[in-house]
Image: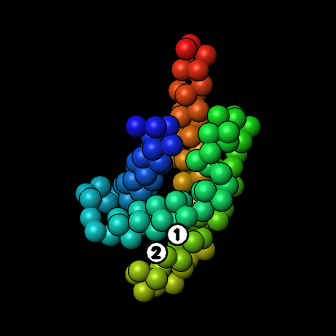
Amino acid sequence: MNKKNILMLGDAIAIAILTSIGFAFHNQTEISPRMATTFFPMLLGWFLLAPWFRLFDENVTSNQKLLLRVPLAMLFVAPLASILRSASLGSATLPIFTFILGFTNAIGMFAWRWIYFFITNRNKQSG
């Protein structure tokens, strides 16, 4: 499995974990179909917009200074995901939900991407 595939798989897992944490925060700890209404829009939004920020490009992912592109991308991903989620539920898009979704996912994805950066660069230095 190449680095890009590992990164993409890790992104999907991070979004799944962040979705689970969000639902657990609301005392919904069992996996339910409702989780899909948050997970899939976030996943779609991320994989549609992250390439625009070159977040799968090794020149970007190997540069610590460029890790800030992750929360920047989330400024665009969260509103898109929130709109997609609202459309699937047939409800209004709530600005506070969009803000919390974006903020928490920006922190979570930044943490995952920092771990990825640390592991891949540690391997470069030792190899």
Q: Quadrant of the C terminus?
A: top right
Per the rendering, the mark at residue 85 is: 2
| Residue appearing at x 25%, y 57% in the figure | 30
Q: Nearer the viewer, residue 6 or 103?
A: 6
**Residue 9 higher or lower than 121, as above or below:** below
Q: Disc 1 vs disc 2: Cβ atoms closer than 8 Å?
A: yes
| Residue appearing at x 54%, y 60% in the figure | 46
Residue found farthest to the top: 126
User: Mark 1 — residue?
Assistant: 81
- Identified by mark 1, the residue type is Ala
Q: Can residue 21 be seen?
A: no
Crowding near the residue tagged with mark 2, few <14, some 14–19, many ≥20 C-alpha atoms within 10 Å: many
Residue 16 in picture, x, y percent from top left: 39, 53
Q: Quadrant of the N terminus?
A: top left
Residue 113 image-quadrant placement: top right
- Identified by mark 2, the residue type is Arg
| Residue appearing at x 53%, y 77% in the figure | 83
